[in-house]
């Protein structure tokens, strides 16, 4: 069918050329053409051989001079008939001499001139025109299907791109949510540990306070004795400070005497007394 559509100039040239009547063909050649056309009617052969042969003969008469184009169009449309169908058609023609002996009537000259002078499109065989229209319709249908499939493919690619973007965003949100959950769990653990530590410290302080309160309430006399001891310690500390001050005064007086009278016989005694006084002090003066 593509060959019939791809070479219109050759077909138009053959259609425009003067037609050679099948009446001028040899009987054997015409019978072979008739058998080849008749092979495309397998149903007719099994049902009514005479009607099938008549249909084949009418088809040859209709496309007189275009037998090769007719056979090519039939093969493109219906495929090559099996060899068995061609043999059965030949046997039918041999067993029916009345069918094989039929000679077509030559068309009048006016009809031939009108056919030659007609436009090439009008002279085109109807089967080829129908096949061309069907092919054009199929091409248009396939173009629409191809355009729809292309649009669907573009939509699918866009949907896949959006799905990929959503998957990336979902993964990011999932990771962010997991991170926040981990941070929240860690913070909650820290707060729980802090609360536990504070509760333990508060419990220890309460126990210590209770123990101290119990000791104070149970030992009032001991507290009074402790106060007396503290008072005595304070008094002794004050007395010691006074004695240390007096010792310092004595030592300054002795040192002043030694500086004033370095040749005095008391210098040696003053040194010995100063050493004893220095031992009584917590820290020796410079």
Image: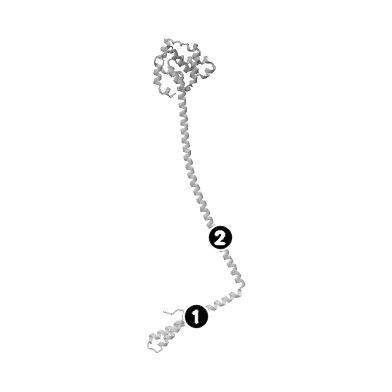
Furthest toward the bottom, the residue is 265
In the displayed structure, 184 sits above or below 76; it is below
Q: Which mark is residue 240?
A: 1
**283 and 92: which one is in front?**
92
Quarter of the figure with residue 199: bottom right
> Can you say which quadrant of the picture contains the C terminus?
bottom left
Q: Distance between the residues labelled 1 and 2?
A: 51 Å
Q: Which mark is residue 196?
A: 2
> Can you say which quadrant of the picture contains the N terminus?
top left
In the displayed structure image, the side of residue 202 where residue 37 appears, left or right: left
**192 and 120: which one is in front?**
120
Query: What residue is shown at x 59% (from left), y 66% (from top)?
Result: 207
Instruction: Identify the secondary structure beneath mark 1.
Output: helix
- How many neighbours does mark 1 have within 10 angstroms: few (below 14), some (14-19), or many (20 or more)? few
Query: What residue is shown at x 49% (from left), y 46% (from top)?
Result: 171
Where is residue 240? Give x, y as percent. Answer: 49, 80
In the displayed structure image, the side of residue 41 where residue 213 appears, left or right: right
Furthest toward the right, the residue is 218
């Amino acid at each position: 069918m593509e060959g019939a559509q791809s070479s219109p100039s050759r077909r138009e040239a053959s259609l425009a050329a003067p037609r050679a009547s099948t009446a001028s063909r040899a009987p054997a050649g015409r019978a072979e053409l008739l058998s080849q056309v008749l092979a495309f009617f397998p149903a007719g052969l099994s049902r009514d051989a005479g009607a099938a042969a008549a249909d084949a003969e009418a088809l040859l008469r209709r496309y007189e001079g275009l037998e090769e184009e007719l056979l090519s169009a039939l093969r493109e449309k219906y495929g090559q008939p099996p060899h068995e169908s061609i043999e059965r058609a030949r046997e039918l023609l041999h067993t029916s001499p009345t069918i094989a002996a039929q000679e077509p009537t030559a068309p009048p000259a006016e009809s031939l001139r009108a056919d030659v002078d007609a436009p090439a499109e009008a002279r085109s065989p109807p089967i080829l025109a129908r096949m061309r229209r069907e092919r054009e319709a199929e091409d248009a249908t396939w173009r629409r299907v191809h355009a729809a499939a292309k649009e669907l493919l573009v939509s699918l690619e866009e949907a896949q791109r959006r799905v990929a973007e959503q998957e990336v965003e979902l993964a990011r949100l999932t990771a962010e949510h997991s991170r926040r959950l981990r941070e929240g769990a860690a913070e909650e653990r820290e707060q729980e540990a802090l609360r536990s530590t504070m509760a333990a410290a508060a419990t220890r302080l309460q126990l210590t306070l209770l123990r101290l309160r119990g000791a104070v309430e149970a030992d009032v006399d001991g507290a009074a004795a402790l106060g007396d001891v503290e008072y005595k310690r304070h008094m002794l500390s004050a007395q010691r400070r006074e004695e240390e001050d007096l010792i310092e005064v004595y030592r300054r007086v002795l040192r002043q005497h030694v500086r004033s009278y370095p040749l005095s016989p008391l210098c040696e005694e003053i040194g010995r007394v100063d050493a004893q006084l220095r031992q009584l002090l917590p820290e020796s003066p410079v």
